[in-house]
Amino acid sequence: MVRARGLAVLIIATFVAFACGGSTGGSGSKGEIDIASDLPTSGADASSGMPTQLGAAFAVSRAGTVRGYSLKFVPYDDATQGVHDPAHGVQNVQAMISNKLILGMVGPFNSNVAKAEIPVANAAPLAMMSPSNTNECLTVTYPYCQAADGFTAESLRPSTVNNYFRVAAPDTFQGPAMADFALKAAPAGLGITKIAVWDDEETFGQGVANNFAKEFAAKGGTVVDRKSYDPKAKSDFHDFLASAKANGAQGIYVGGTSATGACKARGQMAGLFNPDIYYLGPDGIGDAQCITDSGSMATANMYATQGVADASQNPSAASIVAAYTSANPGSNNLGAYTFAGYDCAAILIDAIGRAIDANGGNTPTRAQVITALGQTKNFQGLTGVITLNAAGDQTTPTLQFQQVKPGSPGTWVFKSQFAVGGTS
């Protein structure tokens, strides 16, 4: 499929009320059904993964039961030494598969972890519902997928039946959205015409950076430098930064995550660039760790896209958002994907309920849950009205822009959000 060109700059003003609250069944006397999660919840990744896990856990605890079965949340951490790890994620999925009570999982958070996990879960089969994966090749095979990422959507699904779904907008939108925003004149955008781009050599980072650079150049901007670095081997970015400055870069775009050091380069810009130099990135940098790594350069000229809508902008979600923040107080427990995690768990619960109905009130098979999940239509979520297509994508995803609000501590704050065309 060809990416839909241009973004509909329609700001989402409201969503239909979320209708999946409260208990979904009786006392739970029929037995137990488990929903797992696989997210990075330790080390540098914790500022993204833990709030997402808490959101999913809150949805499960709030539902309590489904069609007379009690619900239990079983979380897994896929970080190794503080960084999301595909091999660790695969081990977690294998553990889930061995637990017959687990009928679906929320996650993973990172696209390279999804790349490793999908074939294992597909063969089981086990339903996957990711709040945050954005690599476009995970769901749709574009002509460049094999060469760029080493896989296609079909190669990840040995059974030929899709078991993987997500609510986040793919990188075919996320990178170009930031490119368009950077190029547009103020106040609609930043008015940047020259930019340097680097990525962390991961599936997600390279994909979003390539899509950003392609769109930026196509719309008349100049990419003055384009580099890829393995952050495990490189921690000093002064050579890249000096080159970017010499070539007249008005900003830098990074394709990466805080866990892979994407914002360490921002911190190293101190003394070399003025504090008002722009630093842009995808959802991988939109967390507290990035602000910490940016140090004195954590200024209001830092922007990140997020692959889902901001639930706090949805009046119909207000009561659940308030209940969550009351149960999980503190800024560290709230992230860009907290309520996407909630929605993913709630969608799984809804699908499990429909699978139970289709199975005569009995415990459904994992395959039956996958079938029901793929039939999700007009689900009233906190982050929007969600319909999933056969490829696994949401048909009407939303992109969000966030900006750093400096302070002690600094934080990412909502700027705007936009409906984008999904895949049919």
Image (cartoon, rainbow, N blue to C red):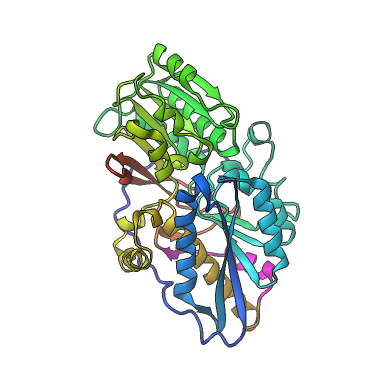
Q: Where residue 339 sits: x, y (%)?
A: 42, 59
Please indicate whether residue 397 sits to the left or right of residue 363 in the image.
Answer: left
Q: Position of residue 215 (x, y in %)?
A: 46, 28
Q: Residue at x 41, y 41 (%)?
A: 305
Give the residue at x 40% y 58%: 384
Q: Nearer the viewer, residue 199 or 369?
A: 199
Seen at 51% across and 41% down, the residue is: 259
Q: Is residue 369 magenta?
A: yes
Tell me where residue 32 sits by quadrant. bottom right
Residue 318 magenta-highlighted:
no
On the image, the x and y values in percent for residue 306 come to 42, 45
Is residue 169 shown left or right of residue 72? left
Q: Is residue 150 visible?
A: yes
Q: Residue furthest top?
A: 246
How many numbered circles are shown? 0
Quadrant (top left/top right/bottom left/bottom right) for the N terminus: top right
Q: Compared with residue 326, is residue 219 higher up or lower down, i.e. above or below?
A: above
> Which range is magenta?
364-381
In percent of the image, x 34 and y 69: which residue is there? 323
Q: Is residue 325 above or below residue 401?
A: below
